[in-house]
């Protein structure tokens, strides 16, 4: 009898546990935790506001959205050069195995940094894993409490995020407005750092760089220029074209645009390089890139001086686009770069135009708020050396009729 009671007790316990487990599973399905409810609400809010982001796979549409301005990312000759470099250095590991301060550094990388610095007319350079890492590491570590950072209001998110992580005073000036810029310079305290882009990623326009250089010198400020979207179309960049190499404090050059690779380099003095190695957290506390990435960067730089034909095709495509576009209900932002933007004024209109373009075979994407400010939502057209006049004509015909 005692055995029967024991068995019944065990059975009740077993089924109670199974029931509790089933209840727990159902609760997880139908009852969200406080944190999960917050996530769900925020996503739902973004959907309701028409701001929801999602990833999209590759497609067969004509490319008018990538940053592969010269077509390096798809260039078969460059691919062969990279493969040859890999075979010539077959002893390298698949991965770097650690940060550059531990096991991830090599003479190959340091020699590459010297080559790139020389190409851009800089004293020294330090390679980062991405352009975001470079700006984050530079602007978060260099300015200190009591210093000042002055940014163009349209500076890239990576610059803004880096500045936020510093303890410096931070000001922004009206886009490309010299009067607004000088007014902010007057309030600069401590070491003053100024950040601009030589070609702005969301507008495609160029600031009055020489005037900005002169004002920074007048107020003993230090100018940092992000050349991400200038290198390629303008050779080594606009700072080189304007022969201002010795008048800027630092430059950030990314390899994921016209060079078709990945990563970035901060160009400046030997002192700056040593400082970043010691204080830049996005450099110190990350695993170094693989050897393949450095080999690709090296060969892309070797490839660039011989790419005059691609640069001329890109310039011809920019000129053809500007002659073909005649928008009625959109605002065309003045630009001589590969980035051409039409402001639609709302997320809905930008999405509608993008869908019409995609339906016609052109992969153009809408840039929506909050990526850009509300009311400046747009279509961002990226032109490339490999686009044909026929593709551009199809694109502009739809935009002109919108």
Image (cartoon, rainbow, N blue to C red):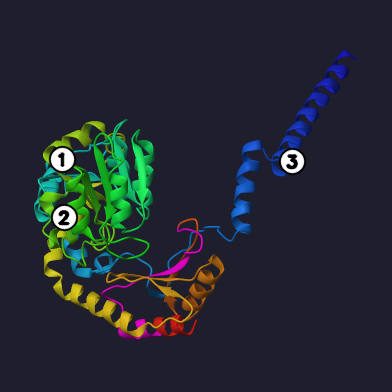
Q: Position of residue 380 (x, y in %)?
A: 40, 68
Q: In this picture, which residue range is highlighted in magenta?
A: 372-394
| CA–CA distance in space, label 2 to label 3 | 55 Å
| Place of residue 264 in the rendered image (x, y in percent of width and height, measured from the top left) | 25, 50
Tell whether position 15 is magenta. no
Say if residue 250 shows up in the picture: no
Q: Earlier in the sequence, mark 2 or mark 3?
A: 3
Residue at 10 percent of width and 58 percent of height: 243
In the picture of the structure, the residue carrying the numbered disc 1 is 106
* Foreground residue among 191 and 205: 191
List the residue tagged with mark 2.
298
Q: Which residue is mark 3?
A: 26
Marks 2/1: CA–CA distance: 14 Å
What separation in Å lies between label 1 and label 3 (alpha carbons)?
Answer: 54 Å
* Percent position of residue 247, x then y: 13, 50
The image position of residue 311, as x and y in percent, is 19, 72
Looking at the picture, tell me which residue is in the foreground, 51 or 221.
221
Left or right for 168, reference 253: right
Indicate the quadrant containing the N terminus: top left, top right, bottom left or bottom right.
top right
Q: Are marks 2 and 1 in contact (CB under 8 Å)?
A: no
- Most distant residue in the top direction: 2
Residue at 27%, 68% (x, y): give it. Answer: 69
């Amino acid at each position: 009898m005692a055995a029967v009671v024991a068995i019944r007790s065990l059975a009740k316990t077993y089924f109670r546990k199974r029931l509790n487990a089933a209840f727990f599973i159902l609760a997880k399905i139908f009852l969200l935790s406080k944190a999960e409810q917050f996530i769900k609400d925020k996503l739902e809010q973004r959907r309701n506001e028409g701001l929801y982001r999602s990833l999209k796979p590759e497609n067969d549409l004509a490319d008018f959205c990538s940053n592969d301005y010269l077509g390096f990312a798809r260039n078969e000759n460059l691919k062969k050069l990279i493969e040859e470099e890999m075979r010539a250095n077959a002893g390298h590991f698949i991965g770097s195995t650690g940060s550059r301060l531990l096991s991830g550094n090599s003479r190959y990388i340091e020699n590459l940094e010297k080559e790139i610095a020389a190409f851009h007319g800089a004293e020294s350079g330090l390679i980062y894993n991405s352009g975001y890492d470079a700006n984050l590491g530079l602007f978060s570590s260099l300015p200190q409490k009591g210093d000042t950072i002055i940014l163009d209001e349209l500076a890239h998110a990576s610059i803004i995020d880096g500045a936020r992580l510093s303890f410096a005073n931070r000001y922004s000036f009206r886009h490309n407005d010299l009067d607004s810029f000088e007014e902010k310079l007057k309030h600069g305290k401590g070491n003053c750092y100024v950040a601009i882009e030589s070609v702005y990623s969301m507008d495609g326009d160029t600031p009055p760089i020489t005037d900005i250089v002169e004002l920074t010198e007048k107020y003993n400020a230090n100018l940092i220029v992000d050349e991400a979207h200038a290198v390629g179309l303008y050779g080594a960049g606009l700072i080189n074209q304007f022969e201002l190499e010795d008048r800027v404090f630092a430059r950030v050059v990314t390899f994921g645009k016209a060079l078709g690779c990945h990563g970035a380099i901060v160009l400046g003095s030997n002192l700056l390089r040593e400082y970043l190695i010691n204080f830049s957290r996005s450099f110190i506390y990350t695993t170094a890139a693989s050897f393949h990435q450095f080999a690709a960067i090296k060969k892309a730089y070797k490839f660039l001086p011989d790419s005059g034909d691609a640069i001329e095709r890109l310039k011809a495509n920019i000129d053809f686009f500007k002659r073909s576009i005649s928008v009625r209900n959109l605002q065309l932002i003045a630009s001589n770069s590969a980035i051409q933007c039409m402001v639609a004024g709302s997320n809905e209109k930008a999405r509608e135009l993008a869908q019409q373009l995609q339906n016609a075979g052109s992969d153009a994407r809408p840039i929506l708020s909050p990526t850009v400010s509300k009311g400046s939502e747009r279509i961002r057209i990226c032109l490339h050396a490999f686009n044909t006049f026929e593709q551009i004509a199809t694109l502009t015909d739809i935009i002109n009729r919108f």
